[in-house]
Amino acid sequence: MSSNYSYKTRDLKFILKEWLPTDEVFAYEKYQDYYSVDDIDTLIDQIDKIAREVMAPTADDGENTPVYFENGKVYIPASFKNLFKYIQENGWGTSNVDDEGGSLPFLLTCATNEFMTGANPAFMPYVALTTGAAGLIKSFGEDYHQEMFLPKMYDGTWSGTMCLTEATAGSDVGDILSKAYPTDDPRIYKIKGSKIFITGGDGDHVENVIHLYLARIDGAASGTRGISLFIVPKYWVNDDGSLEPNDVEAAGIEHKMGMKGSATVALACGDNNGCRGWLLGTYDAETGSGQGIAQMFQMMNEERLLTGSAALGVAAIAYWNAADYCKERIQGRLMTNPKAGRTQIINHEDVRRMLLLNKATLEACRAIINKAAYYIEVGHLEKDPERKKAAAGMAECLTPLAKAYPTDEAWTLICESIQAYGGYGFCEEYPVAQAARDCKIYSIWEGTNFIQSLDLVGRKWIMGKGKVFAAFLQNIEEFISENKAAVGFAKEFANLEKALVSYQAIMAAVGKYVSEGNPGIIPTYSRRILTATAQLYGGMCLLDQALIAQKKIEELGKEHYDYNFYNGKLLSAHYYLRNVVPNVWLVMDIIQDADTSVIESVTETFDY
């Protein structure tokens, strides 16, 4: 097997039990009768066991027997079929959108998504897309929609998708061409159009595929304002529960560089004038306004976090595989003691640098994602209006970081894991090659990382007249003020403080350029600004965790079995604050210099 599940759950348990106030989340009425912090170990161990023993053994099937298209039908790896049914039937997937009876908190869903995806990256999109579609039906569907579709989506009999992208409209969703035409039933519309890049868009693992489909009602306003959302099943569901074809056809599949077990399908709807869809929500015929984009964005924050955690899971398992290999592979002699003979490559300084860069950055990403999930929970469930508003604001600021930073860094970190292996890392018999191919899509899914960066700089910076992001930065400022006297971290706090000042200078420089009539600076530098933002916040998170770890070391002593874990948290903070966070003031220098080569370049520049 080229894949190898090697996930370590200790840091996740630390985050949920020792760092985040998870007990506050479990105290909300929605969860108080079902969960406590004492349940975390059991829950994580149980899902980790499923990932290790049930999911991971199917991972190679996506590579060895990838999705194929034949005679108008899509076929997925055989083992994925039983796995989809198992995950859904046993309540580890879509049924968690049902908020009745102790559904898994989003905080835990997001946390466990990391290693479930790492166990089989190509499989989990089938569950994730079904969950997203079911969530929208749960939120916006009428009772009869929910009764018609949700039970079979929960138990794995049916799957679901999100249908946004078209050949002429990718990220610019407002330009879609799919149309919806009224019928005699005001709830039902005829659908005509085509979609591409639809993950899980078809397959032989389910009896029906329930598409959540964006289209413009005939006569609706142009742009995103006129878009509505429809439930468009592959097979129409009659009142008696029977199924009949709904003129939704798979036109082909994409042949991808990775994720080969995940079906990415082109769909044709209404070619024979027989495709029908249920309108979700309402449509205002006077203004031509639909609710489709607003409905989609309700679930977008959570989906973006899950995309970030998926990238984190793939990169983390590549890192742990590389670390295990480096402990065993004997090669070379140490420059510091060449006479000692050949040694395991983990003893070479550059190998340890690669591994520590992985460890520290992955822990920063894990902290950002789970912190964002915590704020999403509080923003949804908190009764106190001020606290609810503050949490929602933090979630808004963290979401683009939680999506883009892990999905950008995963590629680079996996490349370091490949390098740590040496030549074997480039061979398909070892797990890191597949990880590199699988991970790249995450920076494109759920809004490309350029879009995330524009959301950060162009929207989050000025949200609430700047007050929301000011509160985000104030959290960092207060953390520094309250803790910078801590023994053993003087340089780290000095660097974090310098990064915060540098970041404020970045914001000031961008504001100046915009006021001078040069808004092109924002898209030119926004992705680097997002990375700097994540490094600033990630540095704070790792320092906060290191303070907890230091106290535990003082309490437990060096002989305790958990010493190396806590000491590793100190080393992660030291390395990240001294080697990664300095990029923030490098970005400041670059933006203050304001090189305009990108803006000045013309199309013909790239002819050579």
Image: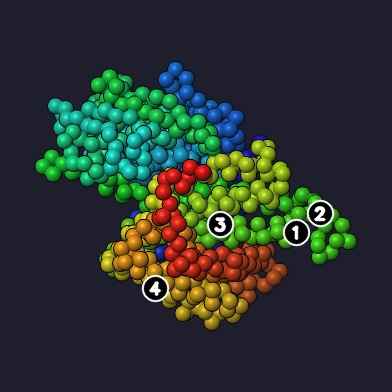
Q: Tell me which residue sits at (36%, 40%) in the image.
A: 170
Q: Distance between the residues labelled 4 and 3?
A: 25 Å
Eye-nearest disc, 3 or 2: 2
Eye-nearest disc, 2 or 4: 2
Instruction: Confirm or deny contact between disc 2 and disc 1 (CB under 8 A).
Output: yes
Rendered view: 149 above or below 271:
below
Disc on the earlier residue, 3 or 2: 2
Disc on the earlier residue, 4 or 1: 1
Mark 3, secondary structure of its residue: helix
Disc on the earlier residue, 4 or 3: 3
Say which residue label 3 marks.
362
Q: Distance between the residues labelled 2 and 1?
A: 9 Å
Q: Distance between the residues labelled 3 and 2?
A: 28 Å
Instruction: Rate crowding at label 4 as few (under 14), some (14 to 19) or many (20 or more) other CA atoms within 10 Å.
Output: few
Circle 2: residue type: Gly
Answer left or right for 205 relative to 161.
right
Mark 2, secondary structure of its residue: loop
Answer left or right for 565 relative to 178.
right
- Residue extending furthest toward the top: 71
Eye-nearest disc, 4 or 1: 1
Say which residue label 1 marks.
348
Disc on the earlier residue, 2 or 4: 2
Disc on the earlier residue, 2 or 1: 2
Say which residue label 2 marks.
332
In the rendered image, which quarter is residue 21 located in?
bottom left
Circle 1: residue type: His
Say which residue label 4 marks.
474
